Image (tube, helix red, strand yellow):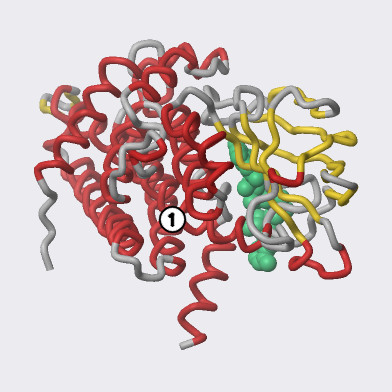
Amino acid sequence: MDFKLTEEHLMIRDAARDFAKSELLPGVIERDEKQEFPKEQIKKMGELGFLGMMVSPEYGGGGMDTVSYVLAMEEISKIDASASVVMSVNNSLVCWGLEKFGNEEQKQKYLTKLATGEALGAFCLSEPEAGSDATSQKTTAIEKDDHYVLNGTKNWITNGGTADYYLVIAQTHPEKKHKGINAFIVEKGWKGFEIGPKEQKLGIRGSDTHSLNFNDVKVPKENRIGEDGFGFKFAMKTLSGGRIGIAAQALGIAAGAYELAREYSKVRKAFGTEIMNHQAIAFKLADMHTSIEAARHLVMKAACDKDNGENYDLSGAMAKLFASQTAMDVTVEAVQVHGGNGYVKEYHVERLMRDAKITQIYEGTSEIQKIVISRSILRD
Ligand SMILES: Cc1cc2nc3c(=O)[nH]c(=O)nc-3n(C[C@H](O)[C@H](O)[C@H](O)COP(=O)(O)OP(=O)(O)OC[C@H]3O[C@@H](n4cnc5c(N)ncnc54)[C@H](O)[C@@H]3O)c2cc1C
């Protein structure tokens, strides 16, 4: 077992770290306050190859492994989790799903633009009555001549207003239940496709979350992904990898908060000494560091499983469950280490604490991860 990163991995991590510090840190507080999408920054991330990291160079991607992707996700998330969720959705849900399961025409037409950042993607599974229970899809896609007619509402869609292409999951054959579900590529601007108002959120406020309405939207048959009825499997397979990205996001949020708390403890004085010299603070930092390191090992294990062609359903779920809990625990403690300063915006940790919560909710709540994990360990 070799715990060492390669030179290439270290270069990617450093490039992401530099980008986050130079391009994302300035203005991150204001974007959070105004719920402003980091448009220019995301454009630059596309130009630097952060939006299609794992896509084959044949389609304009970086051809990198999952380890590289999680290293970059961690660094971006330390500074700006709103930018990193855009990166995560585009890389591990949209691009990965299209490259793995799309046909050649779909890849040429859509993936080449998504991988370079020329276009942005969204992944549309959740509905008002279908969140954790994704089988209960109410959005319908009914076959008619050379197209499908799409009707329904999707909820909580990341990149909802800013995306160009949307992967939409919908029910075609309700009698077949989840085996009747399909996945489609839908373009922004198609007749009957409306973007609902932007959600007002607790955290990741710079990201762009909307509901979407489909009213008799005509989707050409060639935009269905995979065989008829493949949509539910498509969504589950894609989310399984997506969870590794969100686990890395949670890890980054935790690590970012920890680093700020550690540095603060070296300069803030109370009772005539730096607060790091109070054991209560030093022990908090020891606990934070230990749980972050444990989370990092789980994230890396899941990424390595994916890169090695092993099944990563279990390791990805464990990584997300543990890293998201770590993000919550560590950010709360980071605020505590900062005292009153932790409660105001300019010290960043209050934002990281708000951002941490979403990692326990999207791409499968913590309760759903426990279902995945328990089923997996009890099946063997
Ligand atoms: C900011 C944000 C961005 C998002 N981005 C996207 C996106 O891009 N695309 C997309 O498709 N979705 C997205 N989502 C939706 C997200 O994935 C869902 O909110 C999530 O899956 C939970 O679904 P729900 O909100 O309907 O909660 P529910 O399913 O109603 O769950 C409510 C509670 O019940 C628990 N629960 C439900 N079923 C069980 C069970 N069987 N056993 C134990 N506990 C259970 C849940 O864990 C949770 O605690 C986003 C959500 C948010 C808030």
| Front in this rendered view, residue 61 or 171 | 61
Residue appearing at x 51%, y 76% in the figure: 374
Looking at the image, the residue that sits furthest to the bottom is 380
Asked if residue 239 is positioned above or below residue 308 in the image, the reply reads: above
Quarter of the rendering occupied by the N terminus: bottom left
**Badge 1, how many Cα within 10 Å: few under 14, some, many 20+?**
many
- Residues 69 and 283: in front is 69
Whether residue 245 sits left or right of residue 256 in the image: it is right
Position of residue 284 relative to residue 339, above or below, is below
Please determine whether, in this image, residue 51 is positioned above or below residue 104.
above
* Residue at (73% x, 63% y) in the render: 229
On the image, the x and y values in percent for residue 324 come to: 43, 50
Residue located 18% across and 28% down the image: 263
Q: Position of residue 363 (x, y in %)?
A: 56, 50
Is residue 137 visible to the viewer in this orientation of the structure?
A: yes
Dividing the picture into quarters, in which one does residue 267 lie?
A: top left
* Image: 332 above or below 79: below
* Side (left or right) of 48 relative to 13: right
Q: Secondary structure at mark 1?
A: helix
From the top left corner, tell me how far across and down residue 36 is, in percent.
Answer: 55, 15
Expressed as whole percent of the image width and height from the top left, the position of residue 289 reads: 22, 48
Asked whether residue 340 is in view, the answer is no
Q: Give the left or right position of residue 262, taking residue 79 as reference.
A: left
**What amino acid type is highlighted by mark number 1?**
Lys
Residue tagged 1: 320
State the residue in front, 226 or 68.
Answer: 226
